Image: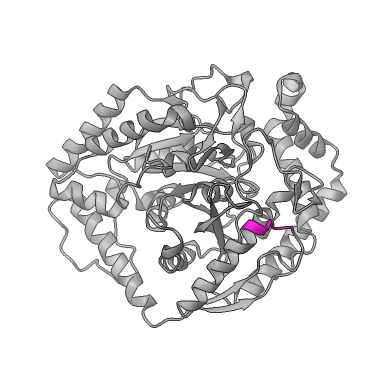
Amino acid sequence: MPAPAHPPIADLLAAFQRGERSPLDVAEACFAAIDAQDERINALPTRVPRDTVRAQAARASQRIRRGEPVGLLAGLPYCAKDMHRTAGVRTTFGSPIFADQVPTYNDPVVQRLLDADAVLIAKSNTPEFAAGSQTFNPVLGATRNPFDTSRTVGGSSGGSAAALACGMTVVADGSDLAASLRNPASFCGVVGLRPSSRSDPLLRNSANVFSTLSMMGAMATRVADLRLVNRAIHAPELARPNAARPIAARPIAARPIAARPIDTWVAQLQAEAEARQAAAQGRRLRLAWTIDAGGAFPVSDAVRAAMQRAIDCLRDTGAELIEAVPDFSGADECFQALRGEYFVENLGELYQRERARMKDTVVWNIEQGLALTPQRLAAAALQRSQVFERVAQFMSGYDAWLLPTAQVLPFALDIAYPTEINGQPLATYIDWLKSCYWVTVSGHPGLTVPAGFSCDAPGEPRLPVGLQLVGRYGQDEALLDVGERVEVALAGLNPG
């Protein structure tokens, strides 16, 4: 079973401020968790030398003690997905082609988290070129589920999810095309956010810097932590030490600036938490929900039972629950086309040279893209626009729309992907991710939170189940507000 989670980031920063804890002892706690568990889990196969990590953590501690400016993630251990280049640290992309690659620069997502003063401790495992929601590759092996090591963690950000669940890190990044932040978070009992699909060319989500099909994002052990890591990635000016300023719903600009910069962060986060709590008082959540979208995608009996328990639990807390589904007509065809285009953009040139050394599912994705006609691509772009507009109209009436994050429980490690659900054959290797990739097509933010446990049959291990919350486009922080309330409401299903 996983180790207990670290305290919330806001509490760690407050403890740093009071001198009760330091970045160095948090790093040591992560090292202890790695030593105790990662030999069997294989979440963080590539690690930064510990002397380097300790030196960086010690420098963060000194800056905090001296009252120097520090970032929002000051001194907190961080693992970067092995798809993200890290200067001086091996980055394999899970591929034999890049097994020995040591980049000379950081990818923007890494740099933004380092600019927020997170301390890189390791690279998290991923499937080859992040293709598929089963974290295994021929370079670094498979990552095992902390709740049952015979099962998968999902993917493609599977190493990050497992590391968080085991207490091996505090900060973790990832990326999400079909489900790569949400699915592994669901399988490992942590939280993950696919942000609203917005272009940020400076973040370089893909080779096409204006693409919004794949999004960079974060996972964490709780929604409050996810909020802060997500800000560092998507609003970096709000997380850097020299740009700290109030962003709470309740203004705190009139307060005198604290003598030590970390005091500013602590005061800001406390004020924001109080403002959110005040705003939620007496306000009933209005939530739409579905389990299988009226039979549009199959859901295993175990996941169905867990979803029903979560919906009943939310209803018991006073939330208004309405069973309803937006119109996702055309989403399947749209996603398959745009996914093929994405793989050609990112790996088409490499495919021409190295096809024989690529995983079969990676080759399949690229060749699906190469077969696309201009008419098909144009139709997919129009379909995505139409799905977005229909979902946006639907979401205008709700605080969030709820559905399963994953349609199955974590499956056996020796299975590349599910081929059937409840006896219903699946046409492609991503059909079991439809509940996530529909949300990708819509462009709306998708947040997964733990929703209890379930098992496929009596006597089998109880495994985590994730509840996916879809929010209004561009209102990611509002979705996180809802997520915090749902997280509290479902706490009884997720004993610590």
The front one of 123 and 134 is 134
Q: Which residue appears at 52% of the width and 48% of the height?
A: 185
Residue 74 at x, y percent in the picture: 28, 43
**Would residue 225 be counted in the magenta stretch?**
no
Q: Which residue appears at 34% of the width and 63% of the height?
A: 247
- Magenta span dominant secondary structure: loop
**Lateral position of residue 21 relative to residue 75, left or right:** left
Q: Is residue 438 above or below residue 155?
A: below
**Lateral position of residue 12 relative to residue 156, left or right:** left
Looking at this rendering, what residue extends furthest in the bottom direction? 282
- Residue 324 can be seen, yes or no: yes
The quadrant the C terminus occupies is: bottom left
- Dividing the picture into quadrants, the one containing residue 345 is top right
- Dividing the picture into quadrants, the one containing residue 416 is top right
**Lateral position of residue 163 relative to residue 52, left or right:** right
Q: Is residue 351 above or below residue 492?
A: above
The front one of 346 and 446 is 446
The quadrant the N terminus occupies is: top left
Q: Which residues are magenta?
A: 298-302
**Lateral position of residue 465 relative to residue 434, left or right:** left
Looking at this rendering, what residue extends furthest in the front direction? 459
Residue 254 at x, y percent in the picture: 20, 69
Residue 381 at x, y percent in the picture: 76, 55
